[in-house]
Amino acid sequence: MEIKVGMLGLGTVGTGVYQLFQKNQGLYQKELGCQINITKIAVAHPEKERKVQVPAGVLIEDATEILEDPEIQVVVELIGGGKSFEYDLNALKAKKHLITADKFLIATGGDELFRVAAENNVNLMFGASVGGGLPVIRWLKDGLRADKIKRLMAIANGTTNFMLAAIAVLSYDTALSLAISKGYAEPDPSFDVEGLDTAYKLAILARLAFRRRVSFKDVYPVEGITALEPADFTYANRWGYVIKLIAWAEDRNGKLDLRVHPMFIPEEHPLAQIVGVNNGFYVEGEAIGEQTLGPGLGAGPEPTASTVIADLLQVCQDIKNSQVSSYPINALEKAETYPVTMIVNRYYLRLALANEAGALAEVTNILKDFGISISAFDQPETTNPEAEVAFITWPTEELNIYKASARFQENPKVKKAYPPIRILSEEEKGGDDGE
Amino acid sequence: MEIKVGMLGLGTVGTGVYQLFQKNQGLYQKELGCQINITKIAVAHPEKERKVQVPAGVLIEDATEILEDPEIQVVVELIGGGKSFEYDLNALKAKKHLITADKFLIATGGDELFRVAAENNVNLMFGASVGGGLPVIRWLKDGLRADKIKRLMAIANGTTNFMLAAIAVLSYDTALSLAISKGYAEPDPSFDVEGLDTAYKLAILARLAFRRRVSFKDVYPVEGITALEPADFTYANRWGYVIKLIAWAEDRNGKLDLRVHPMFIPEEHPLAQIVGVNNGFYVEGEAIGEQTLGPGLGAGPEPTASTVIADLLQVCQDIKNSQVSSYPINALEKAETYPVTMIVNRYYLRLALANEAGALAEVTNILKDFGISISAFDQPETTNPEAEVAFITWPTEELNIYKASARFQENPKVKKAYPPIRILSEEEKGGDDGE
């Protein structure tokens, strides 16, 4: 038996997939008992020189040739960047199984894609859309499917995770230059550093963890790492925390609390162990308790190729058995979201104050006005004209923090109010109702 | 559509499965679009009082009733302890899909069970045989299937992992009493503390990671934790290591190096972060690089139930789609094993020496005779009649360590030679050919 596959795109990931496929083809064939052949690869410039040897006639320019080829049963779309929504939809309508690594498509157009896949009785696989070489999609949709997940936390962007360690000892700008020089960050890094990449991935993870239709727009707020300074890491460290860019998804009495932001994580938490460009995923389930997948490489052509081809092998095994094993995620209810103003956290606050008598009294009175209690306080000695204070609050509703922040902004003795940072604290452990 | 399931055993795990199934039944039904009913549960004493409410008529005494019931399509066998091999074989021969959590059966009789399952075109699922609530079986067989695994390391026994932390500060006996009092260890703990439980699990993991027929007997040596003393942990800590009971599987030029023993693991290694009763699994793959699953609960009725039912849902989804999605692991080649004498490691050695001039010269001369070079050395000051020395060697073939150990045993100035402990060192990183 031979299964013919058409590929779209031969960029970084596409090349990685083609190379890994060629290398392990014998292994795959032996395991499945059938032959998989990539017979067509549509690219923008077929004549361009490539890092991989592709047999003559395989590289084509017109992607519709793949859709119109009745012998091709599987389409592996590796264009990325959300550009191929229409194409993917047409592939499914042409009853071809679809494998994509495109997080945008699933996070923004997932509802329609899953529906059309189900209508046409074909697989839609998206394992590599999150986590690179970490099979986090399978972990959630197959491995943990019998349990009810209460909370998911993820470090899903290796670029920012690498940068955080560098910001701690350098500065944001130096950290960014370092990440760019190592090839971890794009020259325009905004997609990563502003948390958007993480938010797209969170939408996909939350769909699987909570079995609801979740879209990128449901994730709020999305805060990045650009406002962080070395001082924040110093305070965090002093109080036993590390700072991570966290994707957070929690079921709060049926509503989903979905957000992306930097967070103080206790040093002993599994996600605090995720260092460098690695990704890591953590869940709390009713039956399984706490569980972590990672560290592991969340990007890069080789790890991503491993996950894309794992999807391909699953699809080919299904074709061989005349079946469709995609998870039934088309008929889910739309997620209702939980307002972030209502969540309860400890918060880390940092303020630059005028070096004047009464400055701290202004601050503490504002906190008092909103019922915010201080759990830890630090004011490093200084001879500067501005003093800096940092503190950790007791758990309080986020709305109180917004109100206090607004008052800080307008107070002449507060020279600067840095963005508050949420803290993962023991009170929140297993919290399924926000205290 | 209704799928009828027969269960064997309603002990700790069986009760956990039944409870979780009852709790989430509505969820499962909605997700699969079919009804799953546990219609018969065979137990030794149907009249015994149970922690769960089971409808009248479901509890039966004669397990063959399940095999002979043509309406039952799935058998969930939760007897454990390797006692139900014949029964499981008969279930497969009766063309019933089989789910088992029994590591013995798979580690010792897996070859026959997988063959018979394939012959009868039914699923044989064993997700909960290793890792409890951690879906390590799926991780290896589905998630990472496209990659070639070079090495697998596992902390697969929570009892011993808990005890190791206690031995470090107490003693072996006190640690064991503590583990028993917390319910983590059996009154007869030999199966756990001598490494056997870990070895059975390793045989299963290695089969999936390396796609070869691996049996419990292929794992050698199997060393437990009973010889460890607080001093070993003190030295380990001084040199930047923790001690873990490690299941090791490595492909060395086509031969499998399979063993279970305590090991010095660098403090920053992902497996060093697996604390308490947790399990953790670590692989190095050609494409994915390094990747870890865990920490997570590797035992206990609730976590294990989550994995058993994930298998059950997969099987029911297959039945609904008239298909069998079991991984093709019946037609594998038998594993050849790599002799442990040939592996190369750093080693930790601890000796009690007579407090006499020349004692250390004897030791260093023996090491010299076998070409063993010392990388770190420590002799705490003492006024005891016996001196203690501990050292770390440079990488050397294990055979040399055996030879030196034999010479230590017969040397009158060496009062005691403690068992050498293998060290995970950077030289070994990604080692696919044993140096």
Image (cartoon, coloured by chain):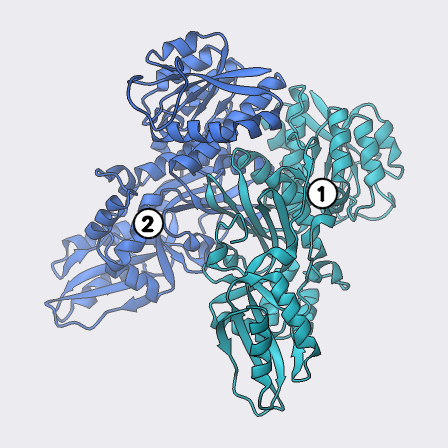
Chain colours: A cyan, B blue
The Cα atoms of the two marked residues, 2 and 1, are separated by 40 Å
The subunit letter for the residue under badge 1 reads: A
Callout 1 amino acid: Ala
According to the picture, the residue beneath numbered tag 1 turns out to be A101
Q: Which mark is residue B20?
A: none
Q: Is residue B39 above or below residue A12?
A: above
Q: Nearer the viewer, residue A321 or A287?
A: A287
Q: Secondary structure at mark 2?
A: helix
Asked whether B342 or A305 is in front, the reply is A305
Task: Provide residue A360's location: percent of width, then percent of height.
Answer: 57, 83
For the residues bearing labels 2 and 1, Cβ distance under 8 angstroms? no
Asked which quadrant contains residue B350, the reply is: bottom left
Mark 1 secondary-structure assignment:
loop
Q: Could you say which quadrant of the image residue B355 lies in? A: bottom left
Local crowd size for mark 1, using a 10 Å CA cut-off: few (<14), some (14–19), many (≥20): many
Locate residue B66, reporting x and y percent.
41, 12
Image quarter where the N terminus of chain B lies is top right
Q: Is residue A420 above or below residue A252?
A: below
The residue indicated by pointer 2 is: B162
- Chain letter of mark 2 equals B
Question: A200 or A30, which is in the foreground?
Answer: A200
Q: Position of residue A285 (x, y in %)?
A: 50, 42
Residue appearing at x 19%, y 65% in the figure: B388
Q: Position of residue A275 (x, y in %)?
A: 55, 60
